[in-house]
Amino acid sequence: MRYNRWALYGLLCLAAIMIMAPVFIMISTSLKSMDEIRNGSIFTLPADPSFAAWSKAWFGDCTQTLGEKCGGLSSSFMTSVQIVIPALFLSVGLGAVTGYSLAVWKMKGANVMFAALLVGMFIPPQVTLYPLIIMIRELGIFGSIPGLILVHVIWGVAFTTMMFRNFFKTVPQDLLKAARIDGAGFWRLFWHVMLPLSLPILGVAMILQFTYIWNDFLLGLTFGGRSGQPMTVALNNLVGSQFGEKEYNVDMAATMLTALPTLAVYLLSGRLFVRGIAAGAVKG
Amino acid sequence: MAEPAPDVLQHSEDRKFTLKSGKKRWRPQWSAGMALIPAMTITIVCFYGFIIWTFVISLTRSRLLPVYKFTGFEQYIRLFANERWWTAMQNLAIHGFLFIGGCVVFGYFLAILIDRGVKAEGMFRTLFMLPLSMSFIVTGVIWQWVMNPGLGLQEAVRALGWTGFEFNWIVRPDRSIYTLAIAGIWQQVGLCMALFLAGLRNIDPNIWKASRVDGIPVWRVYLHIITPMMRTVFFTVFILMSAIVMKAFDLVVALTGGGPGFSSDLPARFVVDHILNRQELGLGAAGAFVLLCTVIAVISPYIYFELKKERGGRGH
């Protein structure tokens, strides 16, 4: 029995090491100089840790490039922030209202609509990509931040609606009846009763939507154009298009910078993330 | 998914509420209907309408821009004669098999280990699920560096003394597809673990007591009793992982770029490439539609069971 316990912890630690190894390699590479990378192994710790590669990844290298842009990720970080925040609030807000309306106000066809929305979550974005491009172009917001926000709201609404609808279905009906008898209408019931009740699910939806929107690549690539490039797209360009010798330390620093916001949200949110991720896994 | 509650208010009761004043009043139901308009528009126009639009484009000669000169199923004939498409489909099968299989096996194994009642369970769970918070682009870039034959894992192992060690799959056309599965499993195994763990926690503890009384070894309880009881969880995991595989685009772009050549191309990348870069709109739309049909074939049993469960749960 004792040996079994040792084997159990041994296996768990082995798995943890294997999962953490790439993250460790990413961080340690980003702190090395290129000479050290060339002469050492990926497993060794940086002899003289330096944030030079981080600063180059963030600010770019202004001595090499022409024009006003230095190629750093800082500008696309700001783009990502400008996309994520409005898209997050709009998609979660719309999902909350839609889920509430579908779950509480029994209307004809509510279940049909919910089923249609649920199926929509599985549709690969590639299938509707071109018509969406035409729509966004016709609206005159192609290649801009508002365009990307709208696209993220469209793609996020199925997931957020599902989260809220399933939660609101569990609210005891006596509570709703009482509120109705007190004269609460649609919006008052939503603001004063349902939304305060749904705070945990609101947290889950916010965390997950933040992660999805921040991590999105396809929509950013398609709809971002030059001015609306989110961080994932900029990272992919940075890694893919270096001239001359590849600077792996800068690549890894840039990767770490791109991963940091969602990593931080994950580590700070703990269980809320776990609760939502299973429900949202179907979303691309 | 949460157990649905019975109907909140009956329609007849609603009418009483609103008509009590005798005058025509703004009924809350109308607000509820109005509130559905944005989501309904998105569903009808941007989901289903756009699918039909893509299908229509796939029946035309469109190249750079959509032109509505119909050519029947010519684009599909071209698609099925396209070697790159078949490479991508074959890769989807290989990648799907390895990725889903790997996630299920490792995820279930990790869940069992954690379910044995370990200290610091929360820490292990957090670590195993950490890659999930990162994007596929980040995952791809990290693994591209780790598997880089010049300075990555291959060199590191050789430096340790095993000079004949070879791990250059990422630059080998016959092996590059396997690197996708490695990076994909690394990222998604935590999700499978979480789903399996939730399933294991739902198992009746009396089963463990009974098996202890009978003296059945632990591994046999898992293999012969618990695993068959977990069928629905296996089914869910399979569906979720299939949905991820079929949409896989970012990972292949960041990890191998579909290369060397098109050796690690996937259908989702084929479609995006033809629509955005190659001015082959019609062909890309045909590919997208075939991809959609594949998704429907895999997920429709899942949707069917989900909706059936809902209907059963409401109890009328």
Image: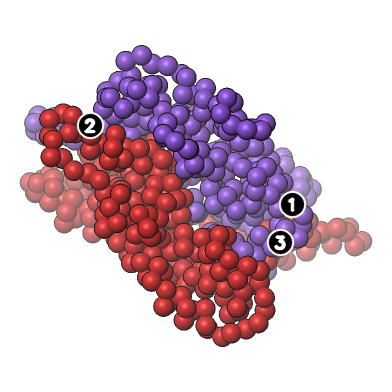
Q: What is the C-alpha distance between the residues marked 3 and 1? A: 9 Å
Q: Residue at x 27, y 40 (%)?
A: B149
In the image, residue B145 above or below residue B42 = above
Q: Amino acid at mark 2?
A: Ala
Q: Amino acid at mark 3?
A: Met
User: Residue A234: image x %, image y %?
Assistant: 55, 40
| Chain letter, disc 2 residue | B
Labelled disc at residue B205: none
Q: Which of the marked residues, 3 or 1, is nearer the chain's N terminus?
A: 3
Chain A colour as displayed: purple
Circle on res. A135: 3
Q: Residue at x 9, y 29 (%)?
A: A2
What's the amino acid at mark 1?
A: Ile
- SS at mark 3 in the image: helix
Marks 3/2: CA distance? 50 Å
Look at mark 2 in the image and give the residue it sits on. Answer: B156
Q: Which chain is red?
A: B
The residues tagged by marks 1 and 2 sit, at their Cα atoms, a distance apart of 48 Å
A130 in relation to B104, above or below: below
Q: Which residue is mark 1?
A: A141
Report the front residue among A62 and B43: A62
